[in-house]
Image (cartoon, grey):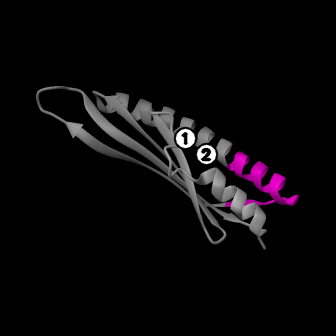
């Protein structure tokens, strides 16, 4: 059972209603619903060929995993500090997606979103 003081502290860490949560290039955000924690990574990237898109997608996959692992470590640290109890996480879902934003016939440059979502069960 989750401690309410710990859950409140995690909620404050994940609250991005006043402009927090991104550095202008990428965003690593999350929210809780019951004992489920959903963390999301988003960024925009540019590419011209299918090969460059594949290369950047591999790089962004690693970057997003690192960012989300850092965020889950922060969640554990904040929870532990708030209620002197430990929290365990179990990864239940992990997926990424590339969404094409802009592509024109007159220019080889294409713009896309990269999204990654990790869902954890907390106990």
Residue at the extreme left: 106
Please determine whether, in this image, residue 52 is positioned above or below residue 43: above
Query: Residue, x 44% and y 47% (percent of image)?
Result: 115
Q: Which mark is residue 100?
A: none
Magenta segment: 72-90
Q: Are marks 2 and 1 in contact (CB under 8 Å)?
A: yes
Q: In the rendered image, which residue does mark 2 sit on?
A: 68
Query: Residue, x 65% and y 54% (percent of image)?
Result: 12
Residue 57: image quadrant is: top left
The majority secondary structure of the magenta stretch comes to helix
Please determine whether, in this image, residue 49 is positioned above or below residue 75: above
Q: Regarding mark 2 in the picture, which secondary structure is present there?
A: helix
Answer whether residue 63 is visible to the viewer in this image.
Answer: yes
Quadrant (top left/top right/bottom left/bottom right) for the C terminus = bottom right
Q: Regarding mark 1 in the picture, which secondary structure is present there?
A: helix
Please determine whether, in this image, residue 114 is positioned above or below residue 32: above
Quadrant (top left/top right/bottom left/bottom right) for the N terminus = bottom right
Q: In the rendered image, which residue does mark 1 sit on?
A: 64
Residue at the extreme front: 18
Instruction: Reply yes or no: does residue 73 show up in magenta.
Output: yes
> Residue 4 at what x, y percent from top left?
75, 69
Residue 101: image quadrant is: top left
Q: Is residue 104 left or right of residue 111?
A: left
């Amino acid at each position: 059972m989750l401690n309410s003081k710990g859950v409140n502290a995690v909620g404050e860490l994940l609250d991005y209603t006043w402009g927090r949560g991104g550095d202008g290039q990428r965003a690593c955000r999350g929210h809780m619903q019951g004992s489920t924690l959903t963390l999301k990574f988003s960024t925009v990237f540019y590419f011209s060929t299918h090969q460059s898109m594949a290369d950047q997608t591999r790089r962004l996959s690693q970057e997003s995993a690192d960012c989300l692992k850092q965020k889950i470590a922060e969640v554990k640290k904040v929870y532990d500090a708030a209620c002197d109890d430990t929290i365990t996480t179990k990864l239940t879902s992990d997926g990424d997606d590339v969404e094409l934003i802009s592509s024109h016939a007159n220019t080889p440059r294409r713009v896309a979103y990269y999204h990654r979502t990790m869902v954890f069960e907390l106990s």
